[in-house]
């Protein structure tokens, strides 16, 4: 080991290795009980692969408000990590490094979480032991990480509810409340590439943790020195409690309450193709759509759980390529709708037939707008919302989601609440609305039917009609407190059946909405900057926008810039927006740009918005829409070109 440390020291002195990397390497070598760690570091040092060592060790993987996310497989896989042959070509051991998703960081995160949960449980005066729910997707090492988390939880004296197999993120959110657990852990990296995995933390309301719990958990995790700990006495150990069919059935029972007109799907003659993209979605979506009465076809090759995601370049339902096999099947069986969900089944993308019969993809903003319009108008058609109580209705969207949803909500008299990016902020609002119901009436809130909770929310609080974000996440009720691909599949199937019953396609229905509210177009782009060098470039850009905001963008004057990291901002309900590294620029020509670093990927993201609205009381004709669409699209093309050129100057 001394030879390794000497080589590391010399690499720092010669500028080949970051000093922070050297410090983390030394700490790991002196504290880790794993022979794999020693062997892997030795291999990389001997090979002089300082770049790989920097990427693995330049920092300790940060436990943020959403948990952890990082690589389980390095760009270079050492022989020690490869180990014995495993199914699907998975290495035997996860990537060694302080900046990686591995047993070290899973243990540290779980220790810190359990410490906080136990403290909070004791302060609450609840009887018995605290419990934590654990879920995982189909990625490499997901099951092993979930089992390690359960081991740590029980050895700290808490019970661990562990799903018997892969399940979706939204089902975990449901299960946390169903089991009355104090927290939840989901092992997933959503739609990231196969080399990644993650660790998402939920609190007792089924939503991802927010303040004050988030900072307190982060403090506990950061104080954990390593993966070793002293288990409680045997008599105080917790239990691992398996979960499976019972939770599935209870969850599906609530999903079945989402359609506002269940007869539509049974009578529309709708044909649907579904793919889970090698993830967990088929567990719930397949039986749900079959029960709804549609003719369902699945992409059988992509029903196979496989952490390599071998049939797609990326398991991201935003991408056309990921849906190509489903679209091909849809053309073969003449389906109306293609539904795809990402590996942990919290996001949904779709393809639909246009009026010419061609399958086209809709964006997350377009899907969300269709769902928002249908849910809002159907609530009025059914008399759930009226002119007398419409002020109790709420649509929630993020600041970087299309303003079309705000226009729909406001026209019908509903509140449109805007939040930061991340469904945890929508979950926080749902908790607030539940707690606004008088305590004596919500004692058994979790066991009440959807109709009963709706009545309570309308009478005493706020009725959540729809919520979503541009990144293909949606929900429409509060029994799940995160974005929900299962709910989304049910919801969009109903809207497609409605459109068909009106002799329309979803594309035609969307144009009908544009004609009434205006043509809204959005474009999302990102620049990937990987590793230690990339992290420094992203930080430089963020600082540059804050200190030197542009006065003019693409020939238009910047009318306002809002820095969410430094400005004091309140939403329409008077709640303060937490500080976040995001800046929104509004231009004199009404275009808008939001810039923010990704919280889960090595990217800086750009969100661009443009719209053209009809005159007050007027509607666009079909011909007017045909002329408006390319003009608005061209304005965003020009905007993105300007922004990319500006990035080059800022990084020079």
Image: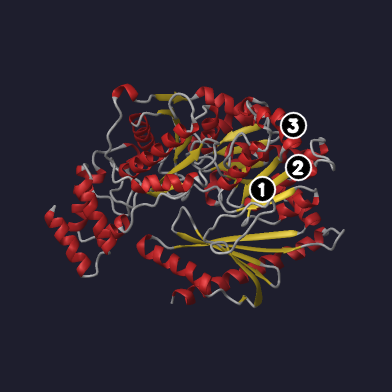
Eye-nearest disc, 2 or 1: 2
> Which residue has dot 1 on it?
396
Viewer-nearest residue: 497 or 477: 477
For disc 1, the neighbor class at 10 Å (few under 14, some 14 to 19, many from 20) is many
User: Where on the picture, by quarter, is residue 618?
Assistant: bottom right
SS type, badge 3 = helix
Name the disc covering residue 392, or none: 2
Residue most extreme to the right = 617
Residue 50: x %, y % from top left? 25, 61
Residue 471 visible in the snapshot: yes
**Image quarter hosting the C terminus:** bottom left
Q: Are marks 2 and 1 in contact (CB under 8 Å)?
A: no
Left or right: residue 265 versus residue 484 is: right
Residue 89: x %, y % from top left? 32, 42
> Which residue has dot 3 on it?
455
Residue 13: x %, y % from top left? 20, 69
Label 2 to label 3, Cα distance in Å?
11 Å
For disc 2, the neighbor class at 10 Å (few under 14, some 14 to 19, many from 20) is many
Q: Residue at left 72%, top 51%?
A: 356
């Amino acid at each position: 080991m001394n030879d390794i440390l000497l080589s590391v020291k010399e690499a720092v002195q010669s500028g080949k290795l970051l000093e922070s990397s050297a410090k983390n390497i030394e700490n790991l070598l002196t504290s880790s009980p794993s022979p794999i760690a020693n062997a892997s570091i030795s291999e990389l040092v001997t090979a002089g692969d300082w770049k790989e060592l920097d990427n693995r060790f330049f920092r300790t993987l940060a436990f943020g408000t959403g948990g952890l996310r990082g690589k389980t497989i390095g760009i270079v896989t050492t022989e020690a990590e490869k180990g014995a042959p495993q199914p699907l070509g998975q290495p035997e051991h996860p990537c060694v490094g302080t900046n990686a998703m591995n047993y070290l960081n899973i243990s540290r995160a779980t220790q810190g979480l359990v410490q906080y949960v136990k403290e909070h449980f004791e302060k609450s005066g609840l009887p018995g032991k605290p419990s934590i729910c654990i879920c995982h997707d189909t990625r490499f090492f997901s099951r092993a990480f979930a089992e390690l988390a359960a081991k740590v939880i029980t050895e700290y004296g808490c019970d661990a509810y562990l799903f018997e197999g892969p399940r979706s993120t939204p089902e975990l959110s449901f299960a946390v409340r169903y089991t009355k657990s104090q927290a939840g852990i989901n092992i997933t990296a959503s739609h990231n590439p196969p080399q990644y995995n993650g660790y998402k933390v939920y609190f007792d309301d089924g939503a991802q943790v927010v303040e004050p719990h988030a900072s307190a958990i982060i403090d506990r995790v950061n104080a954990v020195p390593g993966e070793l700990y002293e288990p409680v006495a045997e008599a105080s150990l917790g239990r691992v409690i398996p979960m499976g069919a019972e939770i599935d059935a209870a969850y599906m029972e609530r999903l079945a309450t989402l359609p506002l007109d269940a007869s539509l799907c049974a009578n529309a003659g709708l044909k649907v193709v579904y793919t889970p993209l090698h993830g967990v979605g088929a567990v719930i979506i397949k039986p749900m759509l079959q029960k709804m009465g549609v003719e369902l076809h699945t992409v059988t090759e992509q029903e196979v759980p496989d952490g390599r995601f071998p049939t797609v370049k990326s398991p991201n339902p935003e991408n056309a390529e990921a849906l190509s096999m489903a679209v091909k099947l849809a053309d073969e069986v003449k389906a109306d709708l293609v539904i795809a969900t990402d590996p942990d089944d919290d996001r949904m993308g779709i393809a639909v037939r246009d009026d010419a019969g061609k399958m086209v993809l809709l964006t997350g903003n377009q899907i969300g707008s269709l769902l928002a319009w249908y849910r809002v108008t159907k609530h009025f058609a059914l008399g759930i919302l009226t002119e007398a109580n419409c002020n109790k209705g709420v649509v929630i969207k993020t600041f970087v989601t299309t303003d079309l949803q705000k226009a729909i909500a406001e026209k019908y008299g509903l509140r449109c609440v805007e939040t930061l990016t991340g469904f945890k902020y929508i979950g926080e609002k749902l908790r607030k609305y539940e707690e606004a119901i008088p305590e004596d009436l919500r004692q058994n809130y979790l066991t009440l039917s959807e109709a009963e909770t709706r009545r309570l929310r309308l009478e005493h609080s706020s009725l959540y009609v729809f919520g979503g974000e541009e990144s293909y996440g949606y929900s429409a009720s509060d029994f799940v407190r995160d974005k929900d691909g299962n709910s989304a599949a049910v919801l969009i199937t109903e809207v497609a059946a409605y459109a068909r019953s009106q002799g329309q396609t979803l594309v035609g229905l969307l144009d009908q909405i544009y004609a009434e509210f205006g043509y809204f177009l959005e474009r999302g782009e990102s620049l990937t900057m990987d590793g230690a060098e990339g992290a420094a470039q992203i930080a430089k850009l963020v600082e540059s926008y804050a200190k030197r905001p542009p006065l003019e963008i693409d020939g238009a004057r910047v009318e306002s810039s809002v820095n969410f990291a430094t400005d004091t901002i309140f939403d329409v309900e008077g709640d303060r927006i937490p500080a976040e590294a995001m800046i929104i620029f509004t231009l004199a020509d009404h275009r808008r740009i939001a810039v923010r670093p990704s919280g889960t990927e090595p990217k800086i993201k750009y969100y661009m918005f443009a719209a053209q609205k009809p005159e007050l009381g007027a509607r666009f004709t079909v011909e007017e829409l045909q002329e408006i669409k390319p003009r608005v699209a061209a304005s965003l093309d020009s905007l993105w070109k300007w922004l990319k050129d500006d990035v080059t100057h800022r990084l020079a």
